[in-house]
Image (cartoon, coloured by chain):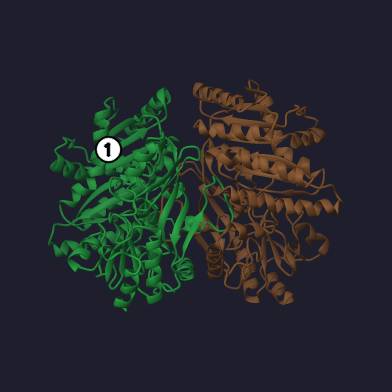
Chain colours: A brown, B green
Amino acid sequence: MGVAVLDEVLEHVPAERVLRDPAVTAGLSADQAVWAPVGVPLAVVRARSAEEVRAVVAACYRHGVPVVPRGAGTGLSGGANATDGCIVLGLDRMDAVVEINALERLAVVQPGVVNDDLRAAVAEHGLWYPPDPASSPWSTIGGNVATNAGGLRCVKYGVTRDYVLELEVVTGTGELVRLGRRTAKGVAGFDLAGLMVGSEGALGIVTEVTVRLRPLPPPAVTVAGHFDSLVDAGSAVRAVGAAGITPAALELVDRHCLQAVDAWKNMGLSVGAEAVLLARVDEPGATGEAIADRIVECFETAGAGWAARSTDAAEAEALFAARRLAYPALERLGPVLTEDVCVPKEHVPEMLGRIEKLAAGYDLTIANIAHAGDGNLHPLIIVAPGDDDARVRAQAAFEEILDAAIFLGGTVTGEHGVGLLKRGGLEREMAPEVLAMHRAVKAALDPRGILNPGKVFDPVGQSTE
Amino acid sequence: MGVAVLDEVLEHVPAERVLRDPAVTAGLSADQAVWAPVGVPLAVVRARSAEEVRAVVAACYRHGVPVVPRGAGTGLSGGANATDGCIVLGLDRMDAVVEINALERLAVVQPGVVNDDLRAAVAEHGLWYPPDPASSPWSTIGGNVATNAGGLRCVKYGVTRDYVLELEVVTGTGELVRLGRRTAKGVAGFDLAGLMVGSEGALGIVTEVTVRLRPLPPPAVTVAGHFDSLVDAGSAVRAVGAAGITPAALELVDRHCLQAVDAWKNMGLSVGAEAVLLARVDEPGATGEAIADRIVECFETAGAGWAARSTDAAEAEALFAARRLAYPALERLGPVLTEDVCVPKEHVPEMLGRIEKLAAGYDLTIANIAHAGDGNLHPLIIVAPGDDDARVRAQAAFEEILDAAIFLGGTVTGEHGVGLLKRGGLEREMAPEVLAMHRAVKAALDPRGILNPGKVFDPVGQSTE
């Protein structure tokens, strides 16, 4: 079977982009979720065109071979991990910006365009693509679409799904189709483009993305606050929401993260606080300054030891740069098990308190970075390399954090996707009837079950039916 | 069959809300699309609770009886029209505002809540629900969700889908489920809540809606412009877009509409212009006034005979009120065949020109109202009652307008839905492979084909496969 499908693939893709050397393919068979299982692929195909993607999927459809799509491999849930005998379909070489249209305020890009590169390209036209996952220097738009990626600006500007107008997709039966539209509005047929966003490659493989753009925002004002407790910082987040303020970003970084960044980059960040909140306000002029001052008040009322509007743009930029470096800095300390829970704003303090208690109870280091203004928390469980007992405790704590988020009316994943790591959590979050709807939709659009099988949920599992 | 299903329904719904008198049910069997065919229902059930909806759909599922959901019946495409032997399921009595949460900025409502009533309820909390179809004094949130309703503010604030967080839905198999979530972000599973929005009752029946809210916007500045030609007004719309301006509304009303409103309400609107553009700007203070002045410039450059920022709030309000009255005013003149095409902004002048030529070529009166800033045009074809020859010409012009929109890269429906009137247009807009995906998703979620069958597309049609 393996040989037959590859013979067909080689009719459409040059041999130098059909990689079979296990030493090479191993490096392209997993994302950044180091705790998730990884299979051995038949081959990694690095596609250069939608037609090649179509031909590969069509061959896999005929032979019943799984296809695992892959962008930059920066995912944090195992969604791009190979399954045994699959073809990993690399899309990072499809990296052309096809069109930037200032009048319609849209851009058309191939899936392998890096998030920051899209932002830089449209900035030349005075335009802006807001979704900015912390991985924006590396992650691709295709991967962003697959996980409905969020980021720092989502609290005001929304997530990837809010910016996807049209998609070119290869379906589970190997057909190349266009879904959605270029117009501002449209309700001709079901929203299948929206359905693809966040479907983690399980319903189709994206070969082109048309995104909505906005005008560049005005320069931002930054507010920083230092807190002696995580829960106080959470209360400050709730207070900002209760004051009716929508900041352009509201990020939390805890002591573990600041220390890890400092130890790596020597940025002089270790302020002695348990948690730092960083807010950005991008309303123009005096309006923005007044909002920033109200955020300072919210921070102080919630118990900040220190809070101020930054008067130094370079300093403010350094704080946000440190926040973006937190994840790679922590990875240097040991395997990181990454959470991505999202809870209603009102429950942010309670959720942070529960995470602290679980860290103490399981005797684990759990660092916290958070898009706190969204209620989207990233507790990061860090285990010393080789400490197998801690690994077991970490996995138990991971599941308890998922359960706490569900209990507080939240979700197990805000922006990373379910992948492999949160399949159990998804089954606990979702009613059996809703999971059955997922299986029905999956079977309808991927009748042979070849598209990233086993990610998100078990397509044929019986556990919840 | 009909009797058996009603016996079951009557076990769950009191007889006084199961209407069978044809004189009564006829008045609840059609929406405002007077050109669309209407069937004769078995009964109209006026549900009071999600449990009643579940019981009715479950009974219909067992007996294979079609269910046609209905809100206020203000639809413009025949989406709520009865099919023979169906149960019309009226949801307008489910009109409770369940929760308004200022901290989370959301409201939970039953589907029968009228759009304007939701806006008024949340305004008491300083909050705002932006989507405002011109039918907002009458249309319900459930119907707005079914058609992904737009309105005047969409050009800046987006459509219904951008505000739907969570839905309670009765599925095609008669199960009551919750889809989506209350949190700001979430990617646990497929976006089935988004899939329901705009699905015109063909994938599920909405029994509760959780909507995202925004803070109330600042008071708006209005700009009006008078144009001697429709195409010039279209060029002004394109010029506003090219200037990078996002108005809070940008509406076009033509001479036919102004005259019809004047004839009805004697508002003194008939300015002698062929078309009037109305723009709203809601940036605060001097910023807003500067943007308004730039819109005046765009209007003048595009050939406006007169353009000015309104200094009189009452006058500005009257102009927008007239725009909202245009549709009912035209209905007084004869049966209106309503278009809802949406084209890229750059093609608004060309599309308006084509509509004018078609009106002349077919010797028809075609009035134009438009959410012009969205490229969403509502050419309204008016035929004198009893003029059968004109009816035939109107139907031909209707299809040609759809084709022109498709040719210009647009869609046959921006915000009204396909319903019955635009099924032919949908088949011409959509690739056969995409229509096949629609049929597969429909079959997956509505296996017996009981949910609003025959709307949007023919579930078992062969014409395009």
Task: Measuring from the top left, give residue A226's x and y in whole percent.
Answer: 68, 27
Please determine whether, in this image, residue A198 is positioned above or below residue A258.
Answer: below
Residue A444 placement (x, y as % from top left): 53, 70
Tell which subunit mark 1 falls on.
B
Q: Nearer the viewer, residue A147 or B364?
A: A147
Tell me which residue sits at (61%, 24%) in the image.
A300
Residue A52's quadrant in the figure? bottom right
Q: Is residue A49 above or below residue B116?
A: below
Q: Is residue B144 left or right of residue A174?
A: left
Determine whether, in the image, residue B81 is placed left or right of residue B449: left
Q: Is residue A407 left or right of residue A7?
A: left
| Residue bearing the label numbered 1 | B320
Of the pair A78 and A375, the residue shown nearer to us: A375
User: Looking at the image, is A49 positioned above or below residue A99?
Assistant: below
* Residue at 37% in and 58% down: B49
Q: Residue at x 71, y 74 (%)?
A: A7
Name the residue type under label 1: Phe
Residue at point 78% right, 27% down? A268
Q: Quadrant of the C terminus of chain B?
A: bottom left
Q: Quadrant of residue B397?
A: bottom left
Q: Secondary structure at mark 1?
A: helix
Percent position (x, y) of residue A167?
Answer: 53, 56
